Amino acid sequence: PETVYFVYQMTFAIITPALITGAFADRMKFSAMLVFMTLWSILVYSPIAHMVWEPSGWLATAGILDFAGGTVVHINAGIAGLVCCLVLGKRIGYGKEAMAPHNLTLTLIGGAMLWVGWFGFNAGSAVAADGRAGFAMFATQVATAAAALAWMFAEWAAKGKPSVLGIVSGAVAGLVAVTPASGFVGTLGALVIGIVAGVLCFWSATWLKHKLGYDDSLDAFGVHCVGGIIGALLTGVFAVKDISGFDGSLILQAKGVLTTLIYSGVVSFVLLKIIDMVIGIRVTEEQEREGLDVSLHGEKVE
């Protein structure tokens, strides 16, 4: 069992830096990415994971609740993604050229696969096939469906047209937001978390990003960080003791959120600056215009 749990935890460690890459797509050198992700996993992910999930960790002993990675995975990766965006700068042509998703069909397929796979992500965090795992799975389904609809209706109201991309984005926002709460909340909590995440993540991925002017290619900050914050905070509001044995505290959850934001944001910034001074982090303008698949890897994606 210990070996299985170790392997399970390693999947979290692999997934988290992968989320960051969505923020700086098309801009970072492959060599710089490898160095950054290696150092980030050791110096940022591992300490945060220990603080939250190790029973003797600082945030764990303080009473911070994070069932499957709201702070450890999503806020952690999301704020690091924002820092990457700010340090690297915008893509060439951002705001002037159309940069719509390459293939909506693949986007929908990927979103569906995420939705199914996330049941293992959340319910699996119970580390048992028991009632709590069942609650986590049900909460995941409720919140994700609610967030998909909430994003769709928010987009419909704001732009006049609902879209498949919006529904998929909302579903991911719901998955993210319910992650820290899944093993602690009931149906009502999951429903509220999903609705709030769908609306606020739509706002952060559209209006907020436009106002602040950063170029987050796949909305790692707008969906993962903001969604993670929503889920982490609302876990403190809707945690049901009869389900998990724990009472929630909004103040304690806010402490966990702020600790993750500050630690991950500062260390990520320092790492990027050091790597930039040593080997450089951004590709050349010519490489970016040609496309990184071709210029860095010699491969053409049809």
Image (cartoon, rainbow, N blue to C red):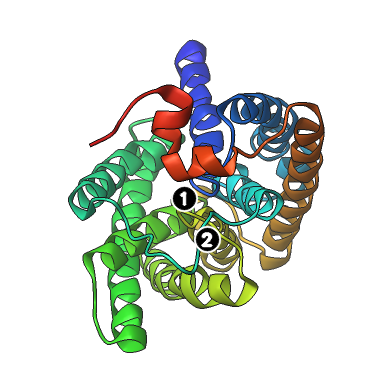
Closer to us: 168 or 188: 168
User: Residue 11, image x and y in percent?
Assistant: 47, 26
The answer to whether 184 appears left or right of 38 in the picture is: left
The residue type indicated by label 2 comes to Gly
- Above or below 53: residue 261: below
**How many residues crowd around disc 2 within 10 Å: few (fewer than 14), some, or many (20 or more)?**
many
Residue 24 appears anywhere in the view: yes
Query: Spatial distance from mark 1 to mark 2, Cα to Cα?
Result: 7 Å
Residue 179's tag is: 1
- Above or below 140: residue 249: below
Closer to us: 6 or 104: 104
Closer to us: 205 or 187: 205
Instruction: Report which quarter residue 194 is drawn in.
Output: bottom left
Residue 231's tag is: 2
Q: Tell me what residue is drawn at x 22 percent, y 65 percent.
A: 164
Residue furthest out toward the top: 3
Circle 2 SS class: helix
Q: Earlier in the sequence, mark 1 or mark 2?
A: 1
Q: Tell me what residue is drawn at x 41 percent, y 65 percent.
A: 97
The answer to whether 162 appears left or right of 263 in the picture is: left
Instruction: Report which quarter residue 252 is drawn in.
Output: bottom right
